[in-house]
Amino acid sequence: MESFKQVLTEDSYFRQEELIFADCNCHQRARVSALLSKAASYAGYDYDARGLTHDKLYAMREVFLLSRIALQIHRCPVAGEVLDITTWENGARGAHMQRVYEMADQAGQVCVSVKSDWILVDPETRRIMRPDCFTVKKLSVCPKHIDCPEPRKIILPKEGLEDWGIRTVRWSDLDGNGHLYSGRYGDIAWDALPSDLQDRTPREFYINYSHEATLGQELQLMGIREADGCRMEGLGPQGTCFTCECVF
């Protein structure tokens, strides 16, 4: 990867990355889980490049937890394609701090636009803090329009839900914090989708992360089909673990 470009500016972080087969489904199209994973990773790359590593933020008791993401897929990237991925902070909205992204092809056309909302947490007390408690740096605002809907709260109806199975959190699902990794939720959702939807690429995807899941926990997956997609909920021991929405 050393041959690919990386650029850190005052307001953004840019990096080139090649999609490999592991990022893609059996049709060689990027999986939603891979796009979610890249969004989470690039937030870390940006701060790492500024010297704001996870360990440093943890010592200052100011860490981020991912709360919500919205993806707009204009054209699904494919295996072997090199993407220019850029991320920017985008200020604060209420209790959330926003980060946005663009994933562009080598012709400069944006394939995927992303908006993500994060919450600031004291890692020792688990107390949620307001964005103005973030003392490490001043939050910047993205200087350009990002062609993506805002992340939104996803609510499923109380009636008409279908049982889409149980998913046990496995060892390979865990991240370095010992929790179900944020990108893995995309695969969990896709494995539970009705088979005729699994082969389709959504034009929009939304997910809310509500409770962290740990090794051995069982997630009861409930879903409902709609005219242009579906919504799904994963229920764990503490209640709703995640909700997501696919728009085709």
Image (cartoon, grey):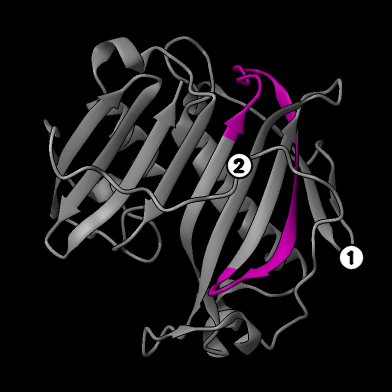
Of badges 2 and 1, nearer the viewer stands: 2
N-terminal label among 2 and 1: 1
Q: Position of residue 26 (x, y in %)?
A: 42, 12
Would you say residue 171 sits in the magenta stretch?
A: no
Q: Residue at (23%, 30%) from the top-left corner?
A: 224
Identified by mark 2, the residue type is Pro
- Quarter where residue 52 is shown: bottom right
Task: Measure the C-alpha gap from mark 2 to mark 1.
Answer: 25 Å
Q: Quadrant of the N terminus?
A: top right
Q: Are marks 2 and 1 in contact (CB under 8 Å)?
A: no
Residue of label 2: 149
Q: Residue at (32%, 47%) from the top-left corner?
A: 243
In terms of secondary structure, where does tag 1 sit? Answer: loop
Q: Is residue 182 visible from the viewing direction of this image?
A: no
Identified by mark 1, the residue type is Glu
Badge 2 crowding class, 10 Å Cα cut-off, few under 14, some 14 to 19, many 20 or more, is some
Q: Residue at (80%, 57%) from the top-left corner?
A: 142
- Quarter where residue 148 is shown: top right
In terms of secondary structure, where does tag 2 sit? Answer: loop
Q: Residue at (17%, 38%) from the top-left corner?
A: 222
Task: Report the magenta residues as a range.
Answer: 72-96
**Closer to us: 244 or 31:** 244
Q: Position of residue 91 (x, y in %)?
A: 71, 68
Q: Is residue 219 above or below residue 20?
A: below
**Closer to us: 166 or 164:** 164
Which label number is shown at residue 10?
Answer: 1
